[in-house]
Image: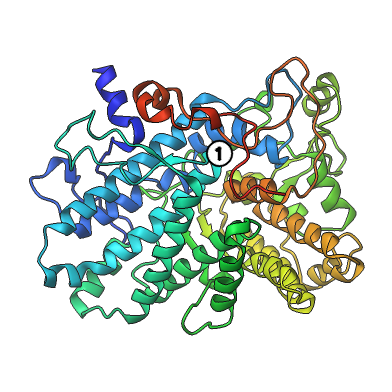
Amino acid sequence: MKKIFLIAATAGLAFSLTSCNESEFTERYPDPAKIAQTTVEKQYTGFLASNKDYVLPKYRNYFVSLRTNVHPFIQATGMPNNSRQYIPGSSGIEDVWFNYYNSVAQYREIQKIYATLSDEQQRDRRIFMLTATIYLYDYTQRVIDLHGDIPFAEAGTLSSKGGDYVGALAKFDDAQTLYVMMLDDLKTIAADLNGITLNAGYQQSFSTQDFINRGDLTKWKRYCNSLRLRLLNRVSDVESLKARSASEMGEILGNASSFPIVETNAQNIQINVFNVNTEINIDDFQGGLESGVTWYINTAGKKMIDHMNANSDPRLRILFEPGENANGQFMGIDPMATNAVQTAQANDGLIATYHRYTLSRNKFLPGVLINAAQMNLIKAEYYLRNSNPAQAKIAYETAIGQSVEFYNYLLSLSNATGIAAPAAATQAQITSYIAADGVNWDKATTNAERLSLIATQKWLHYSIIQSYESWADVRRLDLPTFQFWVDNASEQTQPPVRWVYPSNEITYNNANYVAVRDKDKLTTRLFWDVK
């Protein structure tokens, strides 16, 4: 039975069919796996729910995957130096991999049901397929950006192949080819969304089943085009895709009526928590971020704290608490210090930690997919590449203001007790911060310096909220620059540039794995990582 379960999980074959009602999230839908028939609509909600624990801030993602495999490698948190610290933990890798392929399999189930419908029924339900594909491609980009080549085209087909485990084992698809496929499909979807009309009945059904955008077609258009912009920016230095990146980013940014993107925080794409007593909750996030000083899960890194201190960053007091014995001073763990010094400072209460009021005990933190500050920082990159520093400056400074506004918003959501709430940032503080020497766009004299400013603001904005995005951008840009202790006692002396494949995938999908085995190293750069 164990072997059968593992084979079913390998290469995206397993799926659990769970779903929940969006409208106030007070009732669950019947589990489609336990009823005689399901529908595109109900399966759609099950698909959206399948990865909610990897969008919403949840214990397992933060404690098992991000704590060991992402945050220390982008210095979003501090880390005490120990041998083999740069080898990602296998459990964290497996969790993300299996959850992704669970989502792929649920998407295939929607496709299978949709294919049985008449042409008229398909037209009525087309909005479910279009928006499900946007959501799937968002997650697919994340997994490609972690691993490189992944099974996709043949993945998740166990159900459609009648339980034939061997026949459903999937080949690995080339990462760049998948990016091109997603860009092609999303461009088509953007056009389809502009031409789609829903009758009142299916608008109501879509609004009920869609717990991300609540059936708001305009928000799905913004999601689609914002995701396109993110994909295009990610490949902007790939020689064979440079022209496409520049052309399509220009088309999107030059035609807001046809290609709307997320422009303001009110338009952010995220999963909101409305009622903590429903399935859409983050009830275990506190443990994921506060599980003892020994784990260093929520400790600050020195580079982030030093930058925020030096430039009077108004987000500092919202994101961090000073160590309890630090006399109100914010300090981070120095990656170049010895383990003895690092642990002593942390154990003596000198190291800042992520703010419990704003983050770990805030029961209403949303699960962020795409937001306004992120989009404006991508715009800033685009304009800088295309010799328009004036527009880049506008986008850069707008993003900083939106980022502070976003963290003020997170602060406003919290109802945490027993912890003093930090003061929200003011507009005067934002203006002063933008003028600080380490932030001021006009202090930069070269495009390299301006790009470093943009990259640093991405890193600060992403923090531990958009950790996987931060991982990808840090690797793509090699910015900000970090110092890491060299682990000469390990074969992996510095942080990895990708995740390896899970051992179960190697074991049970070995016939397909051999095609990518030579790439399966922590030091193999992804196709877009060309700097």
Q: Residue at x 32, y 62 (%)?
A: 210
Q: How many marks?
A: 1
Q: Residue furthest left?
A: 36
**Quarter residue 182 falls in:** bottom left
Q: Residue at x 63, y 60 (%)?
A: 236
Q: Position of residue 138 (x, y in %)?
A: 46, 55
Q: Position of residue 134 (x, y in %)?
A: 40, 61
What residue is disc 1 on? 286
Q: Position of residue 75 (x, y in %)?
A: 73, 40
Between 241 and 384, the residue placed more toward the observer is 241
Q: As drawn, is 295 to the left or to the right of 165?
A: right
Amino acid type, callout 1: Gln
For the residue carrying disc 1, how many other residues have a C-alpha within 10 Å: few (<14), some (14-19), or many (20+)?
A: some
Between 179 and 45, the residue placed more toward the observer is 179
Q: As drawn, is 384 to the left or to the right of 243?
A: right
Q: Decide: is 411 above or below 372.
A: above
- Residue 20 in view of the camera: no
**Quarter residue 390 falls in:** bottom right
Q: Secondary structure at mark 1?
A: helix
